Image (cartoon, rainbow, N blue to C red):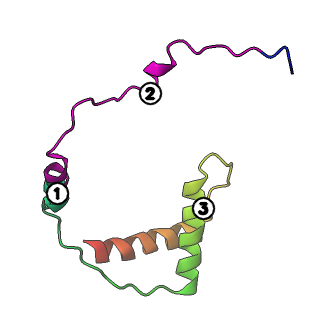
Amino acid sequence: MPNFKRVSLVGSEELFRPTRPEVVSDTDDVIKETVDRPGKASKEVVLRTMNFTPEELELMLDAVQIAKYPDRARAKPALDRFDSLDALRQKIQAVVE
């Protein structure tokens, strides 16, 4: 390629200039202080075990699917299914409170 000409990149030295010309000596102390700093006082986590029937698990899976995709058109649940969902909600709420 005999016709290839190099172009000087004027101002490219600006891209490679140091962002912090002075050396910061307290970096290790700042990092150590940040890492060793105690966290916010957290609440104690209480784990509870609940037993569900396969039907209740299926109801919860369907409810999660409906909550995940609320824009999809769905028919209202039948009254017995609605009552089952309400009973499941009350069961979970009784354990949480």
Q: Quadrant of the N terminus?
A: top right
Earlier in the chain: of badge 1 and badge 2, it is: 2
Q: Do the residues labelled 1 and 3 touch (CB within 8 Å)?
A: no
Give the secondary structure at mark 1. Answer: helix
Q: Is the magenta stretch mostly helix, strand or loop?
A: loop
Residue bearing the label numbered 1: 32
The magenta segment? 5-31
- Where residue 38 sits, quadrant-wise, is bottom left
Residue density around tag 3, few if under 14, some if 14–19, many if 20 or more, within 10 Å: few
Give the secondary structure at mark 2. Answer: loop
Q: Please identify, in this view, whether the residue under mark 1 or under mark 2 is nearer the observer.
A: 2
The residue shown at (47%, 85%) is 52
- In the rendered structure, find residue 16 and report the number of the disc placed on it: 2
Give yes or no for residue 52 being in the magenta stretch.
no
Q: Please identify, in this view, whether the residue under mark 1 or under mark 3 is nearer the observer.
A: 1
Q: Can residue 79 be seen in this view?
A: no
Which amino acid is tagged 3?
Gln
Q: In the rendered image of this protein, does residue 10 appear above or below residue 1?
A: above
